[in-house]
Image (spheres, rainbow, N blue to C red):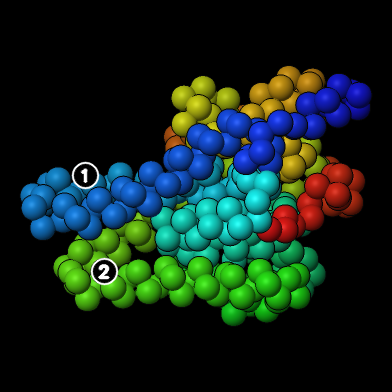
């Protein structure tokens, strides 16, 4: 397996702009269009009927989760550009589009890959701040709807900033700049049209909650004790086409640095091992995991494995990206 997988994990390009693949022009364009859509909503707000605004707001809410879990997420593991300046600039674009610092998200997400949705330890804590077990009881995952609607309020920007300063003072400064630009854009929008902000905030919150819902079912039914089964995958073709292969989540946690375009190939390389390990696969998009027919059997399906150290999962791939 090792020789074949090594050829899959190496992603090279002769592009002078993109660091890994020219295909990254697609998520870059998607991120820019997402921000443009937000600006468009502001421009057409006063001339759009209420039912049209509901449609626009709903699309924006869904697009927040889409961006966070595809464009923004892939950017963390494989920064799109060779130029550090372009990566910084695109990080700012993402921060304005999704409504929080891309650099802060980088740290929180890499922390997620350190713990891999781990269970609570003897002190009741988890390495992964986003773990579905962090606020659960009796060794079980938290209720899906509590996780979905409360996760946004649990983010600790101060703790994130402190950890970011330890990793990179430059990243910490840039992250604060992203936050300032995002909040500044909201202040300007509120001054120009306060009604727009009253309209925007609920849809923004729904979008963040949808992202948490997506995150829950990317791990619910996974095995926190087995690296190859840390995540839950879905091979729905439309979902993976539109979400830049976000469905290959078990594969992603097993080898986080593999480029999004290589995920299907990597899946085919390890599918026999995945089946032997009992990797959970659902039928549709992660955010619709509560509709999956196998949901009621999840507790029975969870493999009872001895705790395996995170060191066995290719530790080199869990290091944070530097931009």
Residue furthest to the front in view is 16
The answer to whether the residues at label 1 and label 2 have Cβ atoms under 8 Å apart is no
Q: Nearer the viewer, residue 183 or 127?
A: 183
Residue 172 position, x and y percent, is 64, 73
Q: Residue 169 vs residue 99: left or right?
A: right
| Mark number displayed over residue 55 | 1
- In the picture shown, does residue 44 fall above or below 95? above
**Quadrant location of the N terminus in the rendered image:** top right
Can residue 323 be seen in the rendering of this structure? yes
Indicate the position of residue 164 as horizontal and vertical percent values. 68, 72
Is residue 59 rendered to the left or right of residue 179? left
**Residue at horizontal 74%, vertical 48%?**
224
Q: Residue at x 62, y 41 (%)?
A: 17
Q: Residue at x 31, y 75 (%)?
A: 187
Category of crowding for the residue at label 2, using alpha-carbon neighbours closer than 10 angstroms: few (below 14), some (14–19), many (at least 20): some
Quadrant in which the C terminus is drawn: bottom right
> Which residue is the site of mark 2?
189
Crowdedness near tag 1: few (<14), some (14–19) or many (≥20) residues, C-alpha within 10 Å = few
């Amino acid at each position: 397996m090792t020789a074949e997988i090594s050829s899959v994990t190496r992603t090279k390009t002769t592009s002078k702009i993109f660091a890994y693949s020219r295909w990254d022009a697609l998520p870059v364009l998607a991120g820019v269009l997402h921000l443009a859509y937000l600006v468009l909503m502001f421009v057409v707000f006063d001339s759009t009927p209420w039912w049209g605004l509901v449609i626009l707001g709903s699309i924006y809410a869904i697009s927040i989760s889409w961006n966070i879990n595809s464009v923004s997420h892939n950017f963390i593991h494989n920064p799109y550009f060779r130029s550090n300046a372009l990566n910084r600039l695109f990080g700012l674009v993402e921060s304005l589009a999704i409504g929080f610092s891309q650099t802060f998200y980088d740290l929180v997400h890499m922390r997620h890959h350190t713990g891999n949705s781990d269970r609570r330890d003897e002190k009741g804590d988890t390495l992964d701040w986003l773990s579905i077990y962090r606020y659960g009881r009796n060794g079980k995952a938290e209720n899906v709807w509590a996780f979905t609607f409360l996760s946004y309020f649990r983010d600790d920007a101060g703790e994130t900033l402190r950890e970011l300063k330890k990793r990179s003072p430059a990243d910490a400064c840039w992250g604060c700049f992203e936050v300032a630009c995002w909040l500044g854009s909201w202040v300007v929008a509120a001054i120009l049209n306060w009604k727009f902000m009253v309209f925007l905030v609920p849809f923004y919150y729904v979008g963040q909650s949808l992202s948490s819902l997506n995150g829950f079912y990317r791990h619910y039914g996974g095995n926190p004790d087995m690296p190859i089964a840390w995540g839950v995958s879905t091979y729905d073709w439309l979902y993976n086409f539109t979400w830049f292969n976000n469905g290959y989540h078990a594969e992603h946690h097993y080898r986080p640095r593999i480029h999004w375009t290589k995920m299907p190939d990597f899946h085919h390389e390890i599918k026999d091992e995945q089946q032997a390990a009992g990797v959970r696969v659902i039928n549709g998009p992660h955010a619709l995991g509560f509709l999956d027919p196998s949901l009621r059997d999840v507790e029975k399906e969870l493999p009872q494995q001895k705790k395996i150290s995170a060191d066995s999962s290719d530790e080199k791939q869990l290091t944070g990206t530097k931009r």
